[in-house]
């Protein structure tokens, strides 16, 4: 998985691309650190470039959610398609996150 | 870490060979075999076969499951339509074999924010450990008559299932590997003291 960060007037947008799996725990630490920066109030994960996610990837979204809650950040998952969208549906992530098409 | 050539792995899987056996990374513990010549070794029926054996370090560095499923599709082991499900189940089995089996890390820590840093630290530490990083994972597939059988074997302590993963699958929240696998596979069997998981799928 690779990530890119953009700062807009609406907040931070983190674009995730590739495969988001058990092999990404180390790389996802730097994403969690972005959520702990003081100047963001809303963070959007753009998942449109994400091809595949496994249960470890879903678990890392839950860790991001907890980090965001601690800082009272709004966290949005946007643009999931295909297998990624199906996994979010299976995990009932709509009850846990703001989901956007 | 040793350099792993993912292109060679992809080439091995996509090649026109009916059989192929070669170290992938220069480490004799890594390799790929495809084709019917390996059938007796795998105890397979008529049909096809695909076999990876990789060190833990290598399996972490290359998209192991994706490459394996590329090979399955190319060689008729699974249809393009069924690939998505098979790849997800296999991914979960490979993750369990590597993280919990060969690296010996507990699944309790993985999704817990308070233990996330510690989990990452331990993961890094185990991947540097010469014994743990060289433990092998074997993925063997055979197929015939519309059924694909895939087994994943690690060299860890062995996992003993204490609760019924089918119950987790029925709750609609299959966020953990075995629950997902049971949702997708026709059957699932554990063997070799919990070091091998064998899954059967409609292909």
Image: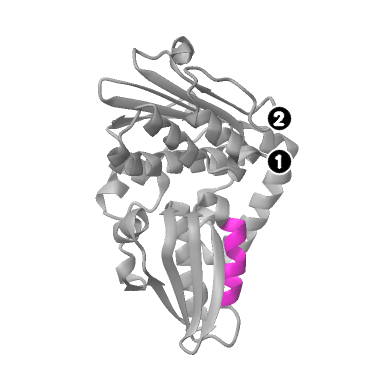
Measure the C-alpha gap from mark 1 to mark 2: 9 Å
Is the residue A93 above or below the residue B179 in the image?
below
Is the residue A38 above or below the residue B182 in the image?
below
Is the residue A96 above or below the residue B19 in the image?
below
Pointer 1 local density, CA inside 10 Å: few below 14, some 14–19, many at least 20: few
> Could you tell me if the residues under marks 1 and 2 are in contact, i.e. CB atoms within 8 Å?
yes
Q: Is residue A30 magenta?
A: yes
Q: Residue drawn 49% across and 64% down?
A: A16
Q: Position of residue B171 (x, y in %)?
A: 26, 53
Of residues B47 and B11, the one nearer the viewer is B11
Q: Are marks 1 and 2 on the same chain?
A: yes
Q: Residue drawn 33% across and 43% down?
A: B85
The quarter of the rendered structure image containing the C terminus of chain A is bottom left
Is the residue B88 above or below the residue B34 in the image?
below
Of residues B77 and B53, the one nearer the viewer is B77
Specify which label sits upstream in the sequence, 1 or 2: 1
Q: Position of residue B94 (x, y in %)?
A: 49, 39
- The residue segment tinted magenta is A25-34
Residue B195 appears in the rendering? no
The residue marked by circle 1 belongs to what chain? B
- Helix, strand or loop status at disc 1: loop
The residue marked by circle 2 belongs to what chain? B
């Amino acid at each position: 998985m690779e990530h890119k960060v953009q700062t807009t007037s609406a907040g931070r947008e983190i674009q995730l691309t590739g495969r988001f799996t058990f092999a990404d725990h180390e790389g996802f630490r730097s994403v969690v650190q972005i959520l702990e920066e003081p100047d963001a109030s809303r963070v959007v994960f753009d998942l449109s470039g994400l091809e595949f996610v496994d249960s470890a990837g879903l678990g890392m979204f839950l860790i991001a959610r907890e980090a965001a809650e601690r800082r009272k950040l709004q966290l949005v998952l946007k643009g999931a398609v295909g297998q990624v969208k199906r996994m979010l549906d299976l995990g009932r992530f709509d009850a846990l996150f703001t989901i956007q098409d | 870490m040793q350099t792993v050539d993912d292109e060679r792995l992809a080439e091995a899987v996509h090649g026109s060979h009916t059989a192929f056996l070669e170290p992938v990374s220069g480490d004799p513990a890594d390799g790929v075999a495809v084709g019917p010549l390996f059938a007796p070794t795998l105890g397979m029926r008529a049909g096809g076969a695909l076999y990876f054996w990789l060190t833990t370090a290598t399996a972490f560095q290359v998209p192991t499951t994706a490459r394996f499923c590329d090979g399955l599709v190319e060689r008729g082991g699974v249809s393009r339509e069924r690939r998505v499900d098979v790849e997800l189940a296999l991914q979960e089995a490979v993750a369990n074999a590597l993280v919990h089996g060969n690296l010996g890390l507990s699944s309790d820590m993985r999704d817990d924010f308070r233990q996330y840093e510690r989990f990452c630290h331990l993961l890094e530490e185990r991947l540097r450990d010469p014994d743990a990083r060289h433990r092998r994972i074997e993925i063997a597939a055979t197929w015939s008559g519309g059924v694909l059988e895939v087994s994943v074997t690690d060299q860890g302590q062995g996992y003993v299932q204490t609760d019924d993963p089918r119950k987790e699958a029925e709750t609609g929240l299959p966020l953990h590997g075995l629950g997902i696998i049971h949702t997708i596979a026709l059957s699932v069997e554990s063997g070799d003291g919990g070091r091998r998981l064998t899954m059967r799928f409609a292909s």
